[in-house]
Amino acid sequence: MHRVAPLVIFLTVCARLSSESRARRLAALRLVGLSTKDTLRVNAGESVAAVFLGSVLGLLGYLGVNEVMARIGLPGLRWYPEDGRPEVITLIACLLGCLALAALVSRVGAQQAALSPISVRRTGERKPPKKYGTVLLIPGLGIIGGYCVLSVMGKDPSVARPAPCWSLVPSC
């Protein structure tokens, strides 16, 4: 489960970012005359199609970059293309999992718009996004940035060093 958690968080955040405009669009469909069930089907179809296209493009991009980076490499960091190439069953499980998760998240997010379209259409002022939401990005960017800096300096970030380190980069 811990390996799937970033994917779940990513899909949930993506659904939340587009939830307001999606809710207005689905409420408009409901007000035009679509049933609740049909509105939820339209929403699930849109979400699954977008996630499928994004997943396939992301997967093709990852496989292409993996091949190129395995040949070029980074200073102090080399790998074989096979090391980063997932098995077919893993790819299928990830794609199907993404599609199922997208359908579930979109259904939960669209439930209010499908059940009560009038309340969605009469929203008050838009609330600006909260500033502290970006705080979670800082540790991840620190780790990625630390690895990149160490690689560019010619140091292997995967080699353990005996000295303690205060940064976010493991074993720097």
Image (cartoon, rainbow, N blue to C red):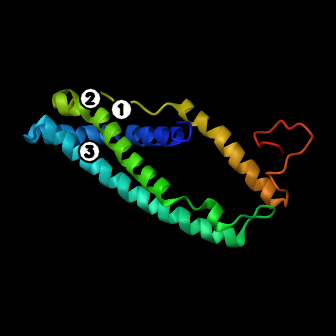
The extreme right residue here reads 163
- Name the disc covering residue 11, or none: none
* Cα distance between the residues tagged 2 and 1: 8 Å
Few, some or many residues within 10 Å of mark 2 (<14, 14–19, 20+): few
* Cα distance between the residues tagged 1 and 3: 25 Å
Task: Measuring from the top left, give residue 43's x and y in whole percent.
Answer: 24, 44
> Which residue, given by chain and number where applicable, does mark 1 sit on?
126
- Is 160 on the left or on the right of 95, as rendered? right
Q: Quadrant of residue 62?
A: bottom right
Task: Measuring from the top left, give residue 154's x and y in whole percent.
Answer: 85, 61
Along the line of sight, which residue is nearer the eye, 139 or 89? 89
- Is 169 on the left or on the right of 104, as rendered? right
* Cα distance between the residues tagged 2 and 3: 23 Å
Tell me the amino acid under the disc marked 3: Ala
Lower sequence index among marks 1 and 3? 3
Q: Which image quarter is the C terminus in?
A: top right
CB atoms at circles 2 and 1 under 8 Å apart?
yes
Few, some or many residues within 10 Å of mark 3 (<14, 14–19, 20+): many
Please, is residue 24 above or below residue 55 in the view? above
SS assignment at label 2: loop
- Name the disc covering residue 123, or none: 2
Please, is residue 18 above or below residue 108 in the view? below
SS assignment at label 1: loop
Along the line of sight, which residue is nearer the eye, 27 or 85? 85
Residue at (78%, 54%) from the top-left corner? Answer: 149
Residue at (48%, 38%) from the top-left corner? Answer: 9
> Which residue, given by chain and number where applicable, does mark 3 sit on?
44
